[in-house]
Image: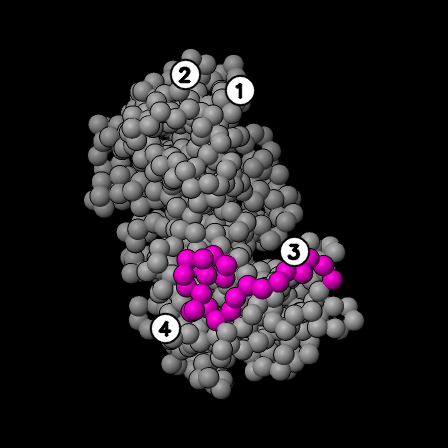
Amino acid sequence: MSGNITRAHQSIRLWNTMNDAARFDEMLALLEKYPQAVSEIALFTGDTHAPMPLDVLQKRVDALVPLMEKARAKGFRCGINHLSLIGHHQEHAVGSLTDAAFCVDINGDEHLGSLCLSHPCTLDYVRESIIMLAKAKPDFLWTDDDLRFFHNGLCCFCDHCIDTFNKRNELAVTRDDLRVAFADSNTHDANLRQLWRKFNASVLTDLFRVVRKAADSVDPDLTIGSMSCEYIFEGWPYADIADVLSHQQQTQTKWRPGGGVYTDERLVGFVEKAHSLGRQAAALPDYVTDIQSEIENFPYQFISKGTHANMMESLLYVAAGCTGTALNIVPAYDEPLSTIEPTIKRAHELRPFFDLIASTIGRVRPVGIGTGWNPATNFASPLNTNGWPQSLRHTEEFGVIGLPLAYENTSATVYALTAESVSCMDDAQIMQVLADGVYCDADAVAALTARGFGQYIGFAVAEQFPQDTMEQYTDHPLNGDFAGHRRNCRQSFSPVPAVAFTPFENAQVLASLVDYNRQEKAACTMGVFENTLGGRVCVCGYFPWTMLQELGKSTQIKNVFDWLANGRLPAFVKSYHRANIWTRSLPDGRTAVALLNASLDRAENLELSVQSIGKTAHFYKMSDYPQQPNGIRLSARTDKDGSSVYRLPALNAWEVALLISD
């Protein structure tokens, strides 16, 4: 369901230093000048990142009350963003809590800026803090992303947490046992890691229960919003937390997924964050319709991330699954507010485009290539502590060349598997994937074969070649005009072994391995197979996930995934462009494709292949606002497979656009 979303949820967050009356009035005047930019204002309780004493918090809250009244008088909804409920890290030590139950990392080191999430002293502090905040009568209350288990190290492994874990699971493990379990890969340790994942999920959900119950003691109707990063170590309890905050769907709740990208120095970071926010949004229940992406410019030096970057990423995150934007761009102290006026002005101008994307795609999940991931996957092997594991980001370069990605298995029309993907899929899930369409690297082939599914793959792993190989394409229809083409990923620079396969009967070879003298080293390093389940399989043993952006390889890969999906790939960039897309099949039968020109070059003659019955579409792009906001009607040519191919108007560098089929 798309949800009842008619407008994007646009807001701005203001630092507590705004209790300077003159400066706050100046900020309100700026927002009034551009009334479509935002509809909500969230006031931070502080400007430091450790939990504060309750008497200090009370003074901060008291100072916010007249500011909220001023904002409401100007027509804005106004609430509170409590920056440090349990704390992010140590800062402003002389003004922060000192007598508390602080969290302890897996090495036994205490972190003074962050509280243990489950200790009774912490829960008492949280309860009193939330009651204090609720009594200020905010229109809404946000918690921040300190409510998680990663604070400069894996947390919390304090004595209280370990004792509670042992009692719940009838175990007697020590911190040393857990440290070994998170570093090793044997079955016993994997089981222990999975128990800890479930424990963390329950602790975090219970903390939100304390938050909700404390607010209820003052105002049961108070809307509470949660900010999250990817809850990897926390066990992925998005739906459980949403149920708690919404009184099981009886009260409105809000969500703000976030994580990094404070400057525009690394452009690909915007796409990586879009995928992160898309995964988080997809994990939320359909009834959560207020999902505001975090736009974070800390420490607010305007030229480190300017107007276009802020607006492009805001639209990008809506394209990935958010339904609006929470701007955190305002300088905290006496930096002139004139520095951010261009961004506020542009947000005002682009509001109709934000509304169009949000109301069109709503909560419909992106459809495309899935990874088979589930919350247990990350704990199947030694833990990657830096967010989404690299081995589960393997599909991202497919996105770069214009293939659509899915963020959950129910939205996948085709799969791309690594061994880690396979590790936490049960037999029924694997059979379903093999009956659909799947692309596998050599490790996934080995893992599936070990599980007894080799007959459905069509290939067996053979020899490895550690150096001096390149792949050479065969004369196969999926290779298009590139028969004989060689792709060299330079193993001397990137020491990844090339893998040869032994094809089964009826398997077809797409590429062989050759050396620098064009002498064949192995007859097959890539191939396709149709199995007895009716599924289609492609295996690739030569740099299957990276260095896909040359014309020959990107053309082959697009042909392969189109074939694997067997008519179910909803859209892809058919031309040779660096462009990401997010594709939805809308409830009314239309197809919506949000697109980013992820290149510093202007995209001319970009062609988009769309599986749709109709042959016309409307096309919108951010550079047309405010001058030409009504879009352009496009007509498609019909491709040989019956799909519609649209040639798009030129897109500027790092510009977001939207195509909606008629």
Residue type (three-letter) at the residue carrying disc 1: His
| Image quadrant where one finds the C terminus | bottom left
Residue occupying the point 28% across, 51% down: 287
Mark 3 to mark 2: distance in Å? 49 Å
Question: Considering the numbered disc 3 on the image, is that residue within a helix, a strand or a loop?
Answer: loop
Residue occupying the point 21% across, 27% down: 217
Report if the CB atoms under discs 4 and 2 are less than 8 Å apart.
no
Mark 4 to mark 3: distance in Å? 32 Å
Question: Considering the numbered disc 1 on the image, is that residue within a helix, a strand or a loop?
Answer: loop
Q: Earlier in the sequence, mark 1 or mark 3?
A: 1
**Magenta region includes residue 461:** yes
Q: Which residues are magenta?
A: 444-468
Residue occupying the point 36% across, 50% down: 283
Residue type (three-letter) at the residue carrying disc 4: Leu
**Closer-to-camera residue (383/331):** 383
Residue with the mark numbered 4: 533
